[in-house]
Image (tube, helix red, strand yellow):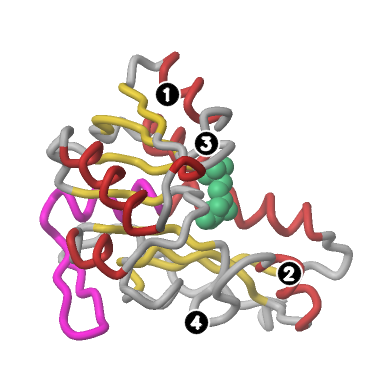
Amino acid sequence: MSVVVLISGRGSNMQALLDAGLPVGAVVSNRADAKGLRIASARGVATRVVEHKGFPSREAFDDTLAAVIDGFKPRLVALAGFMRILTPGFVARYSGRLMNIHPSLLPAFPGLDTHARALAAGVKLHGCTVHFVTAELDHGPAVVQAAVPVLDDDSEDSLAARVLQAEHRIYPAAIRWFLEGRLRLEGRRVIGRDLDAAEGALISPDPEQ
Ligand code: GRF
């Protein structure tokens, strides 16, 4: 019933999963210096490092990564700030049980530097998306999204911090729903059964004020 979490750095989303009491069986990083590895170890969670640098190809790295993951027999593989592009073969192997959290309201701003791009685009709402992973980067079916306002005096950092708080709320919820068998995929749409996190739409600026 466990989850294997893949990280590359800070690991705050991974930590949110642990804080939520989710059954994280292992944390795997492609970087030995990922701060999140120390957090996981301190909490008694198994950690592994598969350094991408030593591999001749993406396929070779992904094969070894998959072997390490499969050793923990996870039901779900959760990407949490894992900064590697995965091969189609890897994505297909975990089809329907590979999730990612992305710091934008997809399909807006796939890829990197999402907060700077949101500011440059002048949007009033920004946010984050938990989605199932498909072969196309940051394009899989959304499980849950959270919107946050973009304030006039926001910097990239202040906006990122607001989005990150929302990330820490929606990723544990999405994974809990998955493990409880409450998510169903219909084409591109993820249909949830009895989900309790719908708190209504966030509209910014609030026309009621
Ligand atoms: C998060 O913003 C996540 O959405 C993105 O990378 C960042 C990882 O942060 N994919 P952390 O390592 O979970 O703190």
- Residue 172 is situated, as x and y percent measured from the top left of the image, at 36, 46
Q: Quadrant of residue 3?
A: top left
Q: Look at the numbered disc 4 and give the secondary structure of its residue.
A: loop
- Say which amino acid is labelled 4: Pro
Residue 137 lies left or right of residue 62; in this view the side is right
Quarter of the image with the N terminus is top left
The number of discs equals 4
Neighbor class of circle 3 (other Cα within 10 Å; few <14, some 14-19, many 20+) is: some
Going from N to C along the chain, the mark reached first, 2 or 3, is 3
Kind of residue indicated by mark 1: Ala
Residue 175 visible? The answer is: yes
Question: Could you say whether the residue bearing mark 3 is in a helix, strand or loop?
Answer: loop
- Residue 209, how many percent across, how many down? 72, 75
The amino acid type, in three-letter code, at marker 3 is: Arg
Residue 182 or residue 204, whichever sits in front: 182
Image point (68%, 83%), residue name: 207
Measured Cα–Cα span from mark 2 to mark 3:
32 Å
Q: Which residue is mark 2?
A: 150
Mark 2: secondary structure = loop
Residue that numbered label 1 is attached to: 40
Q: Amino acid at mark 2?
A: Val
Query: Does the segment drawn in magenta span residue 35?
Result: no
Q: Which region is colored magenta?
A: 171-192
Name the mark nearer the viewer: 1 or 3: 3
Q: Which mark is residue 31?
A: 3
Q: Which mark is residue 107?
A: 4
Asked if the residue at tag 3 contacts the one at tag 4, i.e. Cβ–Cβ closer than 8 Å, the answer is: no
